[in-house]
Amino acid sequence: MERREEIEAPGALPSRQDGRPSRPFRLSSYIVSLFRRKSFARGVHPDTHKSTAGKPIRRLPYAPRISLPLAQHIGKPAVPLVRPGEEVVRGQPIARADGFLSVPLHSPVTGRVEAIRLHPSASGAWVESIIIRAYDSSTQEVLWREPRDMEALAPEEILAAVKECGMVGLGGAAFPSHVKLSIPPERRIHTLVVNGCECEPYLTCDHRTMIEHPADLLRGIGYAMRAVGAQRAIIGVEDNKPDAVAVLTPLLPADGRVTIEMVRTKYPQGAEKMLIKSLLGLEVPAGGLPLDIGVVVNNVGTLTLLGRLLPAGEGLTERVVTVTGPAVKRPGNFWVPLGTPIRHVLQCSGALDGEAHAELEVVLGGSMMGQAITSLDAPVTKGVTGILVYDREWISRETATKVYPCIKCGECVQACPMGLNPALLGMLAAKRDYDSMSADYHIADCFECGCCTWVCPSGIPLVQQFRVAKGLLRARAA
């Protein structure tokens, strides 16, 4: 039964004309108003763990040596422009894009190229990387830039500038931004959706970016709207970030083309299909893309850096990363130069104080969709949104659940935001019936959010099974 408790809200309601104080609002009415927020069907409500939301973004010192994988994005790896022994400065292009689905790479530090060789990556594979030894006396000033007049650029010139700066989706997908903003002639975009939800537990880098760099964000929104020809933009922000809304609202343009909508705090509200459904009431068709319904979605971190980098003529050399978790003594959000070894980040945040690597579990991204890494020598890349560090005590306590047979409870079906049947898909995956998963039960529509695994009382690692199945299907198709 609902508890109808009355609580005071000082200043929320005016006094009555007879001088008597207004009746305080009811908590039940407040809860109802929250449930009226725009949202999507199903989903889950994990603990948010947003303790770093109030911590300003700080800068990390340079690591002595950085390693820059040539493949930090979806598509073909970049092609080196430098050779071992060559001196480079911060911001200098050091690798060019290899085709349309590729982006260039810029040096995050001033130093000397030590080698171009294989180096460990976050996925566990060794990939070709440019290794740069940073000069001890170098500052973090960008020394290579070519400022441009953005107001004079045509849409196709804006797209060329986006590609030139090496921008990819900073929400974690690392899809080249110029490709996402390139709209086929037969398509028309009516709305740019700006994703400020950041629904993943622990992550607060986008939240802090909206608060500390609102002008850059709105500038980047304007560039993206011109590039895709959108008539309006909607910034979607979860209702647990009212401070971000308060900062952005006074800066919105007076013509009303850019608006802010608060949506319910729920996971995975930040998935682009879910956010489109919440804000616009539109559904992306199965197997389709947002542009099929006239929408383009971009992350606030991506647009903020576009707003800063494009007029300055600079390349992407750093990004904001949330560093937190039970084993981190000095959690926060940091500007991290790309290529910085994860070991260096953990040392600066206190996660390795007296702790051996073997006693820690390190995850890149959020706790729902993040990936554990095998080597602390792996670098921070363009797609790294967060670094979560867990100690063995926490791991043993939180992962003590054993895996039991499916009890057909249907919890995963009620949680899946895509309306799939994870229990049935899990049974097919166990039998390796991948053809049925693809042809009959739409496994391709799963974006691996992890809701099914999170709610499963039997502890079945459903999303891990789906990742394996999708990987095998892709390999078979190739």
Image (cartoon, rainbow, N blue to C red):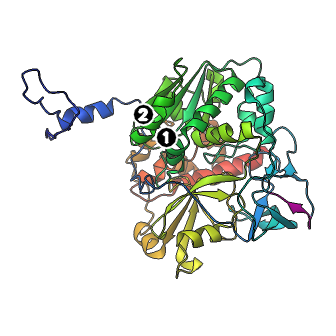
Q: Nearer the viewer, residue 9 or 228?
A: 9
Q: Is residue 185 left or right of residue 217?
A: right
Above-or-below relation of 107 to 305: below
Residue drawn at (78%, 38%) of the image: 147
Residue 401 is inside the magenta segment: no
Give the CA distance from mark 2 to mark 1. 8 Å
**Quadrant of image for the N terminus:** top left
Q: Nearer the viewer, residue 361 or 7?
A: 7
Residue 39 visible at all: no
Above-or-below relation of 245 to 390: above
Circle number at residue 248 = none
From the top left corner, tell me how far across and down residue 15 is, in percent. 14, 27
Magenta stretch, residue numbers: 84-89
Q: What secondary structure is the stretch in magenta mostly built from?
A: loop
From the top left corner, tell me how far across and down residue 185 is, in percent. 77, 19
| Residue matched to label 1 | 197
Q: Is residue 40 left or right of residue 189?
A: left
Quarter location, residue 346: bottom right
Q: For the residue labelled by badge 1, is the local secondary structure a helix, a strand or a loop?
A: loop
Residue drawn at (61%, 40%) of the image: 304
**Quadrant of image for the C terminus:** top right
Few, some or many residues within 10 Å of mark 1 (<14, 14–19, 20+): many
Q: Mark 1 belongs to which amino acid? A: Cys
- The disc, 2 or 1, on the residue closer to the chain's N-terminal end is 1
Q: Is residue 316 left or right of residue 196?
A: right
Q: Mark 2 belongs to which amino acid? A: Val
Give yes or no for contact between labels 2 and 1 (Cβ–Cβ under 8 Å). yes
| Residue matched to label 2 | 263
Q: For the residue labelled by badge 2, is the local secondary structure a helix, a strand or a loop?
A: strand
